[in-house]
Amino acid sequence: MLSRDFGGTKKWRTCFTADATGHTMLYTVANEALHHNVKIEDRKEVIALIHHGGKCYGAVVRDLITGELAGYVSKGTLLATGGYGRVYKHTTNAVICDGSGIASALETGIAKLGNMEAVQFHPTALVPSGILMTEGCRGDGGVLRDKDGYRFMPDYEPEKKELASRDVVSRRMLEHIKKGKGVPSPYGEHLWLDISILGRAHIEKNLRDVQGIAKTFAGIDPADEGSKGWVPVKPMQHYSMGGLRTDCKGHTHLKGLFCAGEAACWDLHGFNRLGGNSVSEAVVAGMIIGDYFAQHCKSAELDISTHIVENFIHASEDYLHHLLHNEGKEDVYVIRERMREIMDEKVGVFREGKVLEEALNELEDLYKRSKNIQVKNKKLHNNPELEDTYRTQKMLKIALCVAKGALDRTESRGAHTRIDHPKRDDANWLNRTLASWPDPNQTLPTLEYEPLDIMKMEISPDFRGYGAKGNFIPHPLKEKRDAEIAQITEEIKAKGGNRYDLQEALMPFELQEKYKAKNIRLGEES
């Protein structure tokens, strides 16, 4: 299998298909779905989840063409709706990644969102379209240049240079622009991505999608020699580490509701994500959570009355009719655009308490104003304005969860950078943020925190390997856990144990036995 270097890693561990790994995976899944006659209902979306007695029984679904509502009653419900990047103005995310799926779970008042302030910004998004220029560009040897053509990353990160983790590269790029080294353009200042140094043959074989995107959306052939082939890029929102809080089996706080992939917060990434781990998560979550979900559906019973289902459908009908006949004066597109601007300007790569407080107050005001949106098109079917209205109300709840979590977390951790609290604070903040919306009339999320047990960790939190050493406040039990880990490791080695024995001793984990099969590493006999 082919593998390449990616940001934040010391070994070539990212397998790939040219620069179209995600496409390859999608084609494979689509082919398998067709092969197994999986029923796919297109152009439909969830309006609300059906739940009763703390248990989920499916969803109220709207047909985007006819406008009709239907109750989809099920033994199990699984959300795999992706991230929430579209609450930001500049993002690499697809237009459907607006967080409305997990917002529907939030609106049950039972399900909770986890670590919503953990938002990743990718260093190399194409200006102005926001289309991702894959990290493979830098993994293969591409470099970043400023307005003078100077390669600046080695000055900031001498060891990893352009292949420091994404949060670090994004911060360094913005710092460099603030020093007056950005390239002016009608779309704001940017920097240059130079892969021309890799040569045309390499680009047309391994980075052909990047080449096509740059040609189509920027009129640039990145294989052209010299500055003619440099591609304009700047950091933009890219990935959501936060999401619907689940356990390791995909269960949410609402029984019968599961979540997988980027939509979920199940601790695969923590407060940051390494390049390549999103497509890896799609495979792993589909395999593990999909299996647990199938087991749940086999054993679950449908014990809900049709009357309750009908009530949820009628409630959604009343809600849509209210939106259509609201006599308010607000414009959904003005509100949505301002929300995105606030998230970009005040809840972005660099965060500060007073600015976050301003953002939270403005977003809360926008949420209140969204109750008075006037939908000019009065049709229930083929009505994008109606759809944008109910989606925007959900998006504002997501944005409020991000901003509130970022304001209250007075430390820097992973992709969450507080310039007024630059240290990672394991003594006070080694916990997960949980956001809920128990009262439909409240205008801000309710936050609580779920502590992590350092005494159960395989590796205690330590220096990340870049930046200033000691730029974190250790947990008071760190030394004790480190001593335990060292002692357990020596005991396992003395008994002739292998890495599987060590794993089981340090941090046993629950997983289907078929997925715990031993693998072989290069250089190991067993």
Image: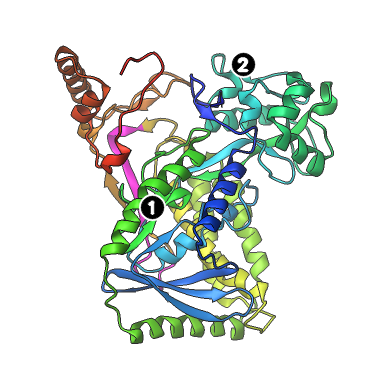
- Could you tell me which secondary element the residue under label 1 belongs to? helix
Compared across the picture, whether 72 is left or right of 134 comes to left
Question: Residue, x 42% and y 38% (percent of image)?
Answer: 269
Q: Nearer the viewer, mark 2 or mark 1?
A: 1
Q: Is residue 484 visible?
A: yes
434 versus 50 height, above or below: above
Residue 311's x, y, as percent? 39, 85
The one nearer the camera, 352 or 442, is 442
Q: Residue at x 17, y 18 (%)?
A: 492
Residue located at (61% from left, 49% from top): 93
Could you tell me if residue 180 is visible in this image? no
Earlier residue among tags 2 and 1: 2
Q: Is residue 30 magenta?
A: no
The magenta segment is 425-443
Local crowd size for mark 2, using a 10 Å CA cut-off: few (<14), some (14–19), many (≥20)? few
- Image coordinates for residue 16, horizontal then vertical, percent: 57, 32
Comparing 368 with 9, the one in front is 9
Name the side, left or right, on which 25 lies relative to 216: left
In the picture of the structure, the residue carrying the numbered disc 1 is 290
Query: Which residue matches tag 2?
Result: 154
Q: CA distance from mark 2 to mark 1?
A: 43 Å
Please provide percent x and percent y for residue 131.
68, 44
Q: Is residue 429 magenta?
A: yes
User: Which of the pair 109/316 is nearer the observer?
Assistant: 316
Tally the numbered discs. Answer: 2
Q: Which mark is residue 405?
A: none
